[in-house]
Image (tube, rainbow, N blue to C red):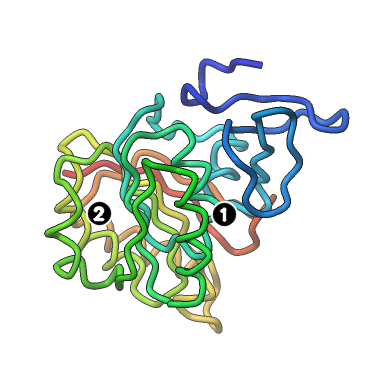
């Protein structure tokens, strides 16, 4: 079922009697399928959770995307199903091998075995004036990662960030962590929307922002 608030290429479809987000592409992680469509589980994907919760992600379909923290490709495979060129940065070699397998059937997905904290190491590959950065990195300094990668975004581009409180400080109150991350982000970005993702991902904050 088409939803005007979702990007073209993302629909709500029925899987085993349950209406779920879906994209059209080869299955990746054992997700339910219906013909060419495959379910996009919000409990497996921070961006999926943000879309399920109704975030205004600013995505219409066909965007150029830099995905930071691609892991084995669960979420970025869905992004590549509806977006344009999608650069997928992952630091760990083991999940990158799975990511390479995912990319074999997606000609718009470009895996990069790189450290998202060091964008200068992939600046010669990733184009500028991107439409979106999707960030899901489990590391301390998540605001710094977003700030360092802002160079790739168009002036009206969107940062879609999932902040993991426990990666910043496992002992701190998540609300305090989120406040600190947002304060640092605001040096580079205008924050447009925030909401906790606890319905799907405990102690995570979803953030939509655009460069200042």
Q: Which residue is mark 1?
A: 74
**Residue 186 got which mark?**
2
The spot of residue 32 in percent (x, y) is 76, 41
Residue at image position (27%, 63%) is 184
Q: Residues within 10 Å of mark 1 (few under 14, many from 20)?
A: many
- Taking the view exactly as shown, the residue that stands out farthest to the front is 104
User: Taking 201 as reference, is 79 left or right?
Assistant: left
State the SS at label 2: loop
Lower position in the chain sequence, tag 2 or tag 1: 1
State the SS at label 1: helix
Q: Nearer the viewer, residue 190 or 137?
A: 137
- Taking the view exactly as shown, the residue that stands out farthest to the bottom is 171
- Taking the view exactly as shown, the residue that stands out farthest to the right is 17
**Residue 99 got which mark?**
none
The spot of residue 51 in percent (x, y) is 55, 36
User: Taking 42 as reference, is 206 left or right?
Assistant: left
Q: Nearer the viewer, residue 149 or 27?
A: 27
Q: Which quadrant is home to the N terminus?
A: top right
What whole-number distance in Å separates the C-alpha atoms at marks 2 and 1? 29 Å
């Amino acid at each position: 079922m088409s939803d005007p608030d979702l990007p073209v290429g993302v629909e709500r479809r029925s899987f085993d009697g349950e209406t779920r987000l879906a994209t059209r592409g080869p299955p990746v992680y054992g997700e339910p399928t219906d013909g060419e469509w495959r379910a996009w589980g919000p409990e497996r994907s921070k961006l999926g959770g943000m879309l399920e919760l109704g975030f205004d992600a600013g995505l219409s379909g066909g965007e150029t995307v830099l995905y930071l923290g691609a892991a084995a490709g669960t979420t970025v495979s869905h992004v590549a199903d509806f977006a344009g060129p999608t650069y997928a940065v992952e630091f760990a070699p083991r999940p990158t091998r799975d990511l390479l397998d995912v990319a074999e059937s997606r000609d718009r997905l470009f895996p990069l075995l790189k450290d998202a904290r060091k964008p200068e190491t992939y600046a010669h590959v990733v184009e500028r004036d991107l439409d979106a950065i999707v960030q899901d990195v489990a590391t301390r300094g998540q605001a710094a990662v977003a700030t360092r990668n802002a160079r790739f975004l168009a002036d009206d581009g969107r940062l879609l960030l999932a902040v993991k409180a426990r990666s910043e400080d496992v002992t701190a109150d998540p609300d305090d962590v989120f406040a600190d991350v947002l304060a640092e982000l605001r040096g580079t970005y205008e924050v447009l929307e925030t909401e906790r993702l606890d319905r799907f991902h405990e102690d995570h904050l979803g953030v939509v922002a655009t460069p200042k």
